[in-house]
Structures are given as C-alpha cells and as structure tokens.
Image (cartoon, rainbow, N blue to C red):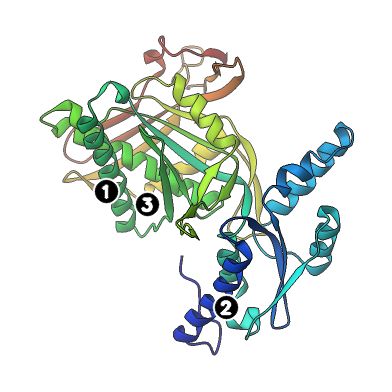
Amino acid sequence: MAYPLPPGVSEAQLRDNIVVLDQFLYNLWNLGENLVFGWTPVAKGLSLLVAPHPLLTEFVGGGGDAEEGRRRNRLLEELLGTPDHLPMPELERMAVALGITPLQIDLPFEPEQGLGLDLIAAIVARYGIRLVEDRAVILFDAVGFSLLSPLEQVVQLNSLSCSVNAAYAKLLDSEININFARTTTGDGFYIWNRMRGIEANVELYQLMQFILADNALARERALRPESVPQLRACFHVGSHYEFYQSEGLNPTSFSYLVGQVTIELARMIERALPGQILVGKFNTLMRGETSSDIVRIDSVDFVERTRQPLKALNGLVLAGAAIDEIACYLTGKAEGGSREFGISEFEIADKHGRPHRVYNAKINIHRREGEPIFLGLREEDLPAFSARLITA
C-alpha cells in the first residue's frame, strides 16, 4: 500500500525516518520476545505499551471469577481491535489495566509530520498482534490432493497459483487493485484482502470468482486432468488475529491469520463437495466508504451487494471471449411453483459435533462467444452434501 508523503518531507527523508522508527521497534521486539500492544504519538516520539508476549494469556487467565475473566477478555479485545493509535488517556487506562508502564521512545522528528499516522500504524503492526472482526477470507482446497504423487501435488499447487495470479491480473485490467495476501494450507490456500471494509470484501469475492473461472478453463484445456486441481471453495467473514512470524531475525513483511474465521473455514471445507462453493453465515459490522461509516451486513445482504460491482466487469475478456454477464447468488428452492427462489440455509456438524451454518453459492459467467462457465453446485446437485437443511 502506498502512503502519501507528509508535507515538506522528501522520499529520501521518509525512507530514513522509516528506518529510524523500525530500528527502535526492532530493538524493543527483541527477536520476538516482546510485542507492542498499543501506541500514541507524543512530541518528538511515541508512547508505547510493550510487554512480553505471554502477557496475552496471563492477563485473560489472571484469576477472579468467570465474570472477571470475561471483563479481562473484552478489555484485551478492545485493545487489540484498535488498528490505529490510542488517545493518551486511553493508553494510560490500558496500561493500568495490564499492569505495565508506558515506554516512550524519542525520535529525531515529529511523528505525524515525519511519517504520518497511517504509516506509523503499518510499521508498528509488524511488532504486535491485531484483532480483526470484519475481514473476509477465502479457503481453496484441491480435491483428492493427498492421493497424488509429490510431483503431481506441486504441479497442482503451481496451477492454482497461476489461477490466482491470472485472476488478479484480470481485476487490475478493470482498475481493481486488490491488496491480497495468501498462505498455504498444504493442499490449498487461505486468501484475504489486506484492506478492510465492505468494498474490500466485495473485491475479494470478485477475486474468488475469477480464480474459480480460470481454474475451470484450465481444467478444460488440460491434456492430463491431474495437472489442474478440482477445487472446492469457502468464503466467510469473521474474527481473527493478524500477526507477523519471525523469519530469521526479523518479523516477516507479510502477515498471518489465525482465529475463528479460519477455524470456521476449515470446518466448512471438510464437508464441501467437489466443485462446491460455500458461504458461511455471518452478521457483522463492516466499514463503509469512510472509517466512521459502519454498516451491519449479513451473508445474504453481502452477496446481494456483490452483484452491482460485477456489472462493471461486463466486457472483460476471459479466455478470448468478452463477458456479457456475471450472475452470483445463493441457491434455494422455487417458492410455490413460481419462478421466485428462496435461499436455503444449511447446518453442518464438524468432527467435534459443533454446528456451523452455511449457504450454497453459484456463479454463472456468460460470455459473448463460447460456452458459459458455471461454477458451484445447483440445489439439485446437493443430495450428497452432508448437511441439515435449516430453512428454505
């Protein structure tokens, strides 16, 4: 992500300021022993909440009754869920609650004038942990991957990577510059948008559609079917922690995710049929066009919101043929013999017996020349789907 130059600061000076702040934080990080839990700008420096990483679990499990444990957990979630700086009174309140003393570092420049608060937040994030509630994540899984030879496995993973890159290039052609990240699961990928909010999550859904479309076309063209994976895909929005692992002696430049959303996706993919697309049931607050514009969105409303931006992709060329229309929807049964369709909600049980609510999704891409590309399974294709129908 590009950050604007602060007024009166050259690119060379900005780079020097980044190095100065990063070196201070690196020394405090101490090879991963400590984390930065919060910060606020002060004159010529930053005030930081820095403590060893075991503080997280020690604080939550620090004694008291169940209500006290819940209060501590809410406080920690409030702190880790703050993506930007804390106002000084809030930082001091958190310091008292955590039992740590704020640490001040002196910088040779005014933080806001020398770097800008958004850039400082991005630099500090590499040395801490953040709780994110509203980011969408995709999970792709290659069907039958464990039954393949190691050579076939690496070829399939490379094919999936090519589809990801091709889909990203298609969105760039339409001036949709999604800032996506991915991490492997061994037989697939988690993919998410580093940006947050409704628009960022809609762009991720678009990316999923084009990845699946490129994969379907690659399977059609493949001389040997085992060279291209058959995919199942799951899309969900939920809470997770974002952190940076150590790589050598430094934190990685890219983040990792772990939390409820990755757990839910893993349970969903276990039950998904080959070729199926599942959307998890969610109901959460998401950022709108501005950070102060917060909207509550559920799964059904979200998929409905993805339709209008898809119209902007009409005319995009896919496999040599222009796209006339992309239709995406959650499947359901016809209502009373009419042409109106409801939306079916399913419940799947994981290996621990815990329930997870999902929807079955379809994506149809109609091209001006060439056959349509049908992604996902129809409602009538679901007899083998190991799930209980909740509502239709």
Classed neighbour count for the residue bearing mark 1: other residues with Cα under 10 Å, few (<14), some (14–19), many (≥20): some
Sequence-first disc among 1 and 3 = 1
Name the kind of residue labelled 1 in the image: Ala
**Circle 1 — which element?**
helix
Q: Work out whether mark 2 precedes mark 3 in sequence or the reverse, and give the earlier one.
A: 2
- Percent of width and height locating residue 74: 78, 44
| Residue shown at 32% from the left, 36% from the top | 212
Q: Is residue 45 left or right of residue 312?
A: right
Between 141 and 243, the residue placed more toward the observer is 243
Task: Give x and y (percent) for residue 232.
Answer: 37, 28
- Give the structural element (helix, strand or loop) at label 2: loop
Residue in view at x 62 percent, y 56 percent? 128
Q: CA distance from mark 2 to mark 3?
A: 36 Å
Residue at image coords 45%, 38%: 138
What is the CA distance from the residue labelled 1 to the residue labelled 2? 35 Å
**What crowding class fits label 3: few (fewer than 14 Cα within 10 Å), some (14-19), or many (20 or more)?**
few
Mark 2 vs mark 3, foreground winner is 2
**Residue position for label 2:** 115
